[in-house]
Amino acid sequence: MITNSMTNKIFEIINGHTFHLHNQRISYVLTIMENGQLGHLYYGKSLGALSVADIAYLKTQNSKSAGTVKYSPDTGNFTLADRAQEYPVYGSSDFRRGAIDVSCNQEPWYLDFKFADYSITSDKPRNLETPESYAIGNEEATQLNMRLVDDQHQLELTEHFTIFDNQSVVVRSTTVKNCTNKPVNIENMMSAVLELPDDKFQMINLSGAWLKERHVKFHNLEQGTVAVESLKGASGHQHNPFIALVRSQDLNQGEVYASNLVYSGNFISQVEVNEWHKTRLMSGLNPTYFGWKLDVNESFKTPEAVMYYSDHGINGLMDVAAGFTKKHVIDRRWRQRDRPIVFNNWEATYYDFDEQKLLKLARQAKRIGMECFVVDDGWFGQRNTDRSSLGDWRVDPRKFPNGIAAFSKKIHAMGLQMGLWFEPEMVSPDTSLYQEHPDWVVRHPYKCVSIGRGQYVLDFANPEVVESVYQQIKPVILAAELDYMKWDMNRNITEAYSPYLTRHNIPQTEFFHRYAQGVNRLYQLILTDFPDMLIEGCAGGGGRFDLGTLFYCPQIWPSDDSDAVERLSILTGTALAYPLSSFSNHVSAAPNDQVGRQTSLDFRQMVADFGPLGYELDISKLPLDELEQIKENIAFYRRHRQLFVNGRFRQLQSIDPQSNEVTWSVENTDKTEFFVGFYRKLATPNSGVLNYVKLPMVDPNLTYQIDGQEKVSGAVLQHLGLRQPYQFNGANRDTAELYGDFQAHLFHIVSVE
Ligand code: DGJ
């Protein structure tokens, strides 16, 4: 046994053929199988040091061969059909979908990657070129790189497994290198595979549509394949790359495996259950409309997949995913910095504004405590509707007669930060950019071109286009001394075709991935020059809410639906996979612009307080009492901002979007302070005046004070629960605290002597 201990991340090799990566929380065990390929033995709770006998025992999971087709005449009964594998291939004795497909001269290659050697690395710096997880210094991460070779086809495959100190996470990616003397084509290449020994799981995915993104969906696993995917050139409103496998819907108990991609483009995340109830989870680049030509000696590396594990149910998963994302994906400096309370003019004015109107709003915003003034859309070219001027990033002199620099100076002089909206990937037909560079647009030469929101997509697979867009945007950032930028993207890609790729003899099947790389390149250019600017991601609301975007943008506009009731479902789903700090929440007008719903300002604020806070309504027209309410909420939020943005977030009742009641909480690390948000959507007749919600997270040995009044022991709060506000039962009108639809209460619970 070789043991290599680096801080708390342990790497062991047992008997020369089994590799064990573990830390305080998890173990990941892989082995070289009888045929030289890489097999998987275990992922889950930490097993501690493993003996030779333990390994032999783990291996018995696979030793009773069930497949009728055997791997080769030389390996006896051995078949890949029932083997848990790290990176399976189709074409031999396993008939499920494989993780990689390669062809050469239109002939499919049946691949056979055998172990060659391995290396251990511990540096994983944050590199703006590619969104990937990162570690600071050499102590935080250990990466095992397993090099495998297919001798017959002269291909080399390196499987990267990264384990982090104190994280229940394994990050995987794969590199393939062409060592032949002719080009080959990658037809399919997944980021990660996770084989599980049974199928006693429900799958959770986060799906929906524009205005209702990332609702929690459950599927019972059965023999067959369930997949979520995108072919839109972005992760999309409809499906998110995150999927989870849960043993039960229990919020606090039970095993959960989940995976997510550090990628913003076309993806597929799928779960296949075979005839023997074995589960194979795979996630990566969507192979449809994908192909990559690998010239001699060239390599291709997949995006990373993050594989989460928790044995504390859904809340455990949320904690693992949020903690990892804040420390190893998002630029960590944002954990310390306060997220500004934003005033965004979009739903306040839409395109109907000028400098004077905005300054009036800004003065009001400042007066009631807001911190960053964002001009959202409409400030450039002739942009009075959404059909014009994208790509012409020069200020509209009719709206800003003194220019953007002068306007921004006034905003800064008020003590506000300054933010501007851009949609860098797009072009409107009425711009000189479009007229002068028709070949800079994504379009097939022979076909009609679909148009969305009156705009076309720029060909970000072309580095010249990306550079040119940046050269337009950069002077605006400089002139306005921007503190904040909102990067929007309001239509998806159709008739995917890049004239640039054809000119350079690059296959069009590379378009979608190269487009995603172009987007990364623009982020890289911006953040290299302006590392302190806060970029808020957005794609017609939540059409690109993923780890690929969070690598560059610490927060994302999660939906164009700002209705507080809908946000309960969107936040519930989103927080399964992403930290609260990434979920930008704005208080908007009532009735709400997207659904016409009337809710109280109190209700809207109590929903929006969880996460980075903003306001997006015409504050120049609000009655004085509402302005006062906003001012009070802002002062309150500022006092507790760290908890609302970076506290540990939990669900206390249910994550089902149909649930009439939502109760969630944030807590500090030493469990001395909590906020519990209780929300009831519709009034229910006579449903009991007194109801309790258990608080599993409180310390039973402490005493807590609720809302500065009652003092109760942690044990009581844990086992009986927190009393919900008194409900109206039809007869107690005078004493009821919850009366009518859309009710909320924000409990503040603090430990006392
Ligand atoms: C879509 C975004 O999601 C909105 O918040 C707003 O920025 C508009 N685009 C502006 O066109």
Image (cartoon, rainbow, N blue to C red):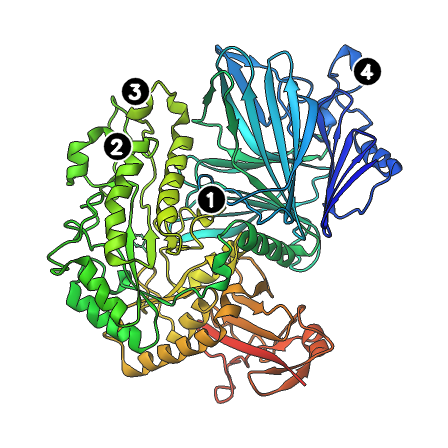
Disc on res. 76: 4
Asked if the residue at label 4 sits under 8 Å from ligand 1, the reply is no
**Of callouts 4 and 2, which one flags the residue occurring earlier in the amino acid sequence?**
4
Badge 3 crowding class, 10 Å Cα cut-off, few under 14, some 14 to 19, many 20 or more, is: few
Q: Position of residue 666 (x, y in %)?
A: 56, 68
Task: Indicate which label's residue lies in the foreground, 3 or 2.
Answer: 3
Which residue is situated farthest in the right direction here?
53
> Can residue 569 be spotted in the picture?
no
User: Which secondary structure lies at badge 4?
Assistant: loop
Q: Position of residue 251 (x, y in %)?
A: 64, 59
| Cα–Cα span, label 3 and label 2 | 14 Å
Q: Amino acid at mark 1?
A: Gly
| Cα–Cα span, label 1 and label 2 | 24 Å
In the foreground, 50 or 357: 50
User: Which residue has dot 2 on it?
Assistant: 441
Q: Quadrant of the N terminus?
A: top right
Disc on res. 503: 3
